[in-house]
Image (tube, helix red, strand yellow):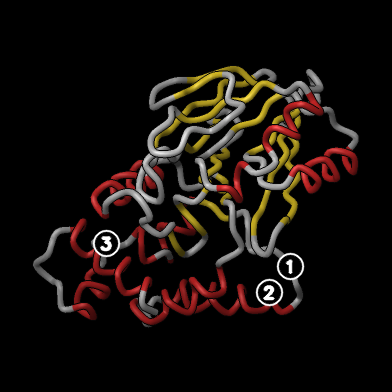
Amino acid sequence: MAAFQFHQFSYNADNYGVLIHDPTTGQTACVDAGDAAAYEAALAEKGWSLTQIWITHHHADHTAGLMKLKEGSGAKVYGPTPTRSPIAGIDEQVKEGDSFSFGGSEVQVLETPGHTLDMLNFYLADQGVVFTGDTLFALGCGRLFEGSPAQMWSSICKLMALPDETIVYCSHEYTEANADFALSVDPDNAALVQRASEVKDLRAANQPTIPTNIGLERATNPFARPQDKAIRSRLGMQGATDEDVFAEIRKLKDNF
């Protein structure tokens, strides 16, 4: 099987879109559709024709361009079952345990509620790539607009169970701010200190910090590390559950 090609591009103030292209079949998918013009420009730049759209959740910065992009391409749209906010334009609603075909690969659907209740992530196991929407960010995780800390911690655990080498495409360039917060709760983590420095250099050069990978997040992302003794000690939560430590880290980040 030929390796897929991935093209990440920016839109709005800090969003990322991604195109996925199978050179064998010529099929192309995109993750979310927050700005139709940006997606169309990226497709034109690569010379690819859109055949599928994968929607992670209902927020407008992920769906505002969906109908225009769908109508212009005829692409089939996969997305979540409606919770609080139905999404117009979805052709096939998918949920945890479902899968669908793209090119020569199986796309596995992961439900990762927390940021929203309808959040989906999409995992290409044979390509070693996962698209985490607003669930897992580089050095961070999404705010809890609809879900609970328990739900988000369960979602993070689901992602952390993927192989270390799994490449992670998330939907926002938040890494520099996330690094500043991460150092406030895990300042003696040498891997984090080094990574934070690298992130600042990349952003100073206007370069993306995405994609990341699961192993790097497991080593440096405080939201994936509530079991860490140093973090627990700094928070005075040595005897707490992982879920409670996670909830405290999320609360601290919300007020950072």
Question: Residue at 54% across / 76% down in the picture?
Answer: 196
- State the residue in front, 182 or 251: 251
Mark 2 is on which residue type? Arg
Say above or below: 174 vs 126: below
Question: Which quadrant, please, contains the N terminus?
Answer: top right
Q: Which mark is residue 203?
A: 2
Mark 3, other Cα within 10 Å: few <14 / some 14–19 / many ≥20: many
Measured in 3D between alpha carbons, the distance from the residue under mark 2 to the one under mark 1, in whole angstroms, is: 5 Å
Label 2 vs 3, first from the N-terminus: 2
Measured from the top left, where is residue 2 in percent x and y? Answer: 74, 26
Mark 3 is on which residue type? Phe
Question: Which quadrant, please, contains the C terminus?
Answer: bottom left
Residue under circle 3? 246
Mark 2, other Cα within 10 Å: few <14 / some 14–19 / many ≥20: some
Q: Secondary structure at mark 3?
A: helix
- State the residue in front, 204 or 34: 34
Measured from the top left, where is residue 35 in percent x and y? Answer: 72, 47
Q: Secondary structure at mark 2?
A: helix
Question: Residue at 79% across / 20% down in the picture?
Answer: 24
Q: Which mark is residue 207?
A: 1
Number of marks present in the image shown = 3
Q: Quadrant of residue 29?
A: top right
Query: Does the CB distance between marks 2 and 1 fall below 8 Å?
Result: yes
